[in-house]
Amino acid sequence: MSSKAAAQPPEISRRGLMLVLSSPSGAGKTSISRRLLQEDRRLTMSVSVTTRAPRSGEVDGRDYHFIDVPRFEEMVEDGQLLEHARVFGNYYGTPRGPVEAALAAGNDILFDVDWQGTQQLNEKMPDDVVGVFILPPSHLELERRLRSRAQDSEEVVIGRMKKAADEMSHWPEYDYVIVNHDLETCVSQVTAILWAERLKRERQVGVGDFVRGLIADGPA
Ligand SMILES: Nc1ncnc2c1ncn2[C@@H]1O[C@H](COP(=O)(O)OP(=O)(O)OP(=O)(O)O)[C@@H](O)[C@H]1O
Ligand SMILES: Nc1nc2c(ncn2[C@@H]2O[C@H](COP(=O)(O)O)[C@@H](O)[C@H]2O)c(=O)[nH]1
């Protein structure tokens, strides 16, 4: 065997996980998600449907599937959404098909959903969900970030700030809590969580076979 082949890590089959990020609006979920997706090829984003209008620069199918209310209601009726909620006056939901396909393929999926969505995902797939709650460093900084994004009207920013306390009151429902003070640090911390959760014994469904092989290969 060449030394290159010997250096390959063993493939141990694994069940995918659902990494769920929630926070008050503007604390940094989208920024963190983009970085995680750039750095980790086994992570895919769950692209939600929403009835909200696209922000400038948002791309249909990448950031969201932008749909109208009748289509949203049809998807709910048909059971096409794994979870759904009304947030800031608009409807949002997670399409079921891509999530089930990714999990079956042993891939991990990243979700940017509010506390209502997290509760529903936890009820349906409690063993697969890893919940991470992102807090802003301060109320003032949250407001500064919402404004500096410069993509929402003053009315929308005020509405989102009013709901921040309500969203933050759900932090005890999550497995991990991180303060997004510095984006780099925060991305490293979420990455550490992702790896620790991937390596959990119960998710490494192929580890039994791997160990049996190791034992069989050893001296009698
Ligand atoms: N650690 C950070 N330091 C400074 N600015 C940050 C940090 N993290 C994110 N931001 C900025 O804050 C703004 C809001 O971030 P982002 O859009 O990622 O928040 P969000 O939680 O996804 O919001 P929403 O729930 O409304 O979608 C953006 O302009 C982003 O660049
Ligand atoms: N329950 C769900 N919440 C979702 C989903 N997609 C996004 N969201 C949450 O909505 C707010 C606002 O998002 P924005 O893009 O309009 O700023 C934010 O808290 C998201 O986490 C979803 O599919 N289900």
Image (tube, rainbow, N blue to C red):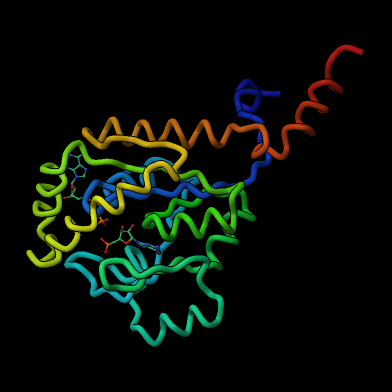
Q: Is residue 34 above or below residue 177?
A: below
Q: Is residue 85 above or below residue 28?
A: below
The quadrant where ligand 2 appears is bottom left
Could you say where residue 13 lies in the image, as x and y percent from the top left? Answer: 68, 41
**Which residue is at a point 20% across and 36% down the rendered structure image?**
137
Q: Is residue 152 left or right of residue 130?
A: left
Residue found farthest to the top:
219
Could you say where residue 31 lies in the image, as x and y percent from the top left? Answer: 26, 47
Q: Is residue 28 above or below residue 161?
A: above
Q: Is residue 164 left or right of residue 193?
A: left
- Viewport quadrant of the C terminus: top right
Between residue 203 and residue 39, name the one nearer to us: 203
- Viewport quadrant of the N terminus: top right
Q: Is residue 104 left or right of residue 49?
A: right
Between residue 29 and residue 65, name the one nearer to us: 29
**Which residue is at a point 38% across and 57% down the rendered structure image?**
113
**Which residue is at a point 32% across and 71% down the rendered structure image?**
60
Between residue 120 and residue 150, name the one nearer to us: 120
Q: Is residue 218 left or right of residue 103?
A: right
Could you say where residue 141 lies in the image, as x and y percent from the top left? Answer: 13, 42
**Which residue is at a point 50% across and 46% down the rendered structure image?**
42
